[in-house]
Amino acid sequence: MENSTKNKLAALASHTLFLTCIGAVMLFRSSSGNYFEKLKNSIFLTAYSDERKTEELTALKNKIEEISGVKNAAVLTENEVLEAMEGALAKKDILLSIKSVEIPSLIKIYPGSLNYENFGRIASLIENMHGIKAVDSGGNAVKKLFVFASDFQKAIRFITALLLLSAFGAALGASSSMKYLSEKFRFLSERAVPPGDILLKYASELFLIPLASLIISMLILLAFYQTNRGGIMFFLTPGEILLMLALSSLPSASRLVKSA
Amino acid sequence: MKLLLKAENIWLENSRAIVFKNVRLEIKKGDFIWLEGRAAAGKSLLMRTLAGKLRPAKGELLSYASAPLCTPGAALLENESVKDNIMTLLRGKEDSAFVMAELLKHMNLFSARNIPAKNLSGSQRQMLILATFLVLDAEMIFFDDPLVPLDNEQRVLFIQAAEKKRDQGTAILISSTLACPAACPALTKHLLLKDGKLNEE
């Protein structure tokens, strides 16, 4: 294989690896952020109150929201609870039997962070508040959810670090794979070849290698994304794709500037 | 003859002293100029100034054509063969293969045409550097101290190749610590740079 072909293939491979790693980092960051947001919204405390008046319930809600670590609280009055049940329950006779029971008002409390100790502290503080009958923190199932969230967060951090490390290595590889270009630029500029002619002569290396590697890495990321279609994963935004294009041109651009 | 470069009383100073002063020089198409001077006489700085890489402190320098300057440390495509180093500069030109073969024969590099530049001996490497400048389509070419790593036979080969280039209309300016060799063309303009002054011999 010719030397220049080898150089081009090495440059293409290292650029593709670099962009795939960077793209995967972006994909993981945005998708995991979205997943954690969903997880946060599914974890809440339910406080039961015998209060019936809207003003009293609102005051209680405001008092709960003042507790540190509470993101927000939502009040569901007795009627709202019944309406919600009407929508959810198909058999009206069940509902009729429920109507004979006195239904307490509900306050849903969302924590600001996924920290189980904090969650427990908030639950006990609310439980001791005047006007609160009981607090349901979800028991063992919610505790397991916290453990899972913590482990998942650690895994995401580890994968991100690994991908960033690989991206850094690949960036070094991409930069060194373009060394032959900087040698050529210097060779030609010393021989008074105009910069415009140099750019034209090596346009394919300067523009096609970054562009081709971007397309290949996009296809790899798209194939990965397809395996999770309908799941929690988000594909890259146009802004992120543009950022990747800019990053892909960095190794050759830096060589060009260095040898100018 | 077409005027390619005109230097009118140019001066160059560095932090310690005046490198050269009142240099007057005209380079015309087809000139063959030999610039002699002792080591550290300021030849390289004068060449760099004439090539437009340094700005003179005083005087006027008018250059009507670009002048590639061949320095002892000029870059080569280290991993490319001798042939490819030349072909990189000839790409897209007519008869490039013929021009390349002729030049390599003149410079005694034909047998080494497939060897990567990094594997050449010191003198072969210098011959290749000189060949990559002689192949250029420039109106003037400056060679700064090109003879040092070469043996006598190679020096004669280079001067003959440079004379051939001059015959095609390119002005050649060569600087050296050596006196103008007998191999130089008959109408060679011989200049001497001494104590910062440039005189024609």
Image: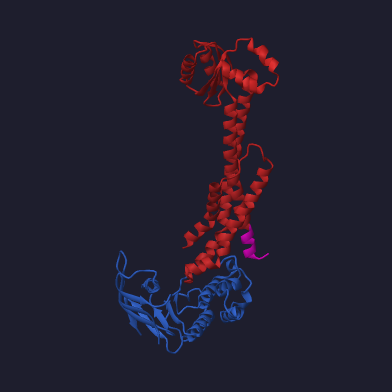
Which of the pair B191/A26 is nearer the observer?
Answer: A26
Percent across and percent down for residue A28 are 60, 40
Whether residue A8 is in magenta: the answer is yes
Query: Which contiguous range is marked in magenta?
Result: A1-9
Percent across and percent down for residue A244 are 55, 50
Magenta stretch, overall SS: helix
Which of the pair A53/A137 is nearer the observer?
Answer: A53
* Residue at 47%, 75% in the rendered image: B146
Percent across and percent down for residue A246 are 52, 53
Rendering colour (chain A): red
* Residue at 57%, 28% in the rendered image: A41
Rendering colour (chain B): blue
Question: Seen in the image, is A215 located left or right of residue B53?
Answer: right
Which of the pair A256/B124 is nearer the observer?
Answer: A256
Quarter of the image for the N terminus of chain A: give it: bottom right
Question: Seen in the image, is A194 located left or right of residue A16?
Answer: left
* Residue at 42%, 89% in the rendered image: B187
Query: In which image quadrant can residue A7 be found?
Result: bottom right
Most distant residue in the bottom direction: B186
- Asked if one can make out residue B76 in the rendered structure from this viewpoint, the answer is no
Percent across and percent down for residue A216 are 64, 53
Whether residue B30 is in magenta: the answer is no
Q: How is the image coloured?
A: by chain
Query: In which image quadrant can residue A177 be found?
Result: bottom right
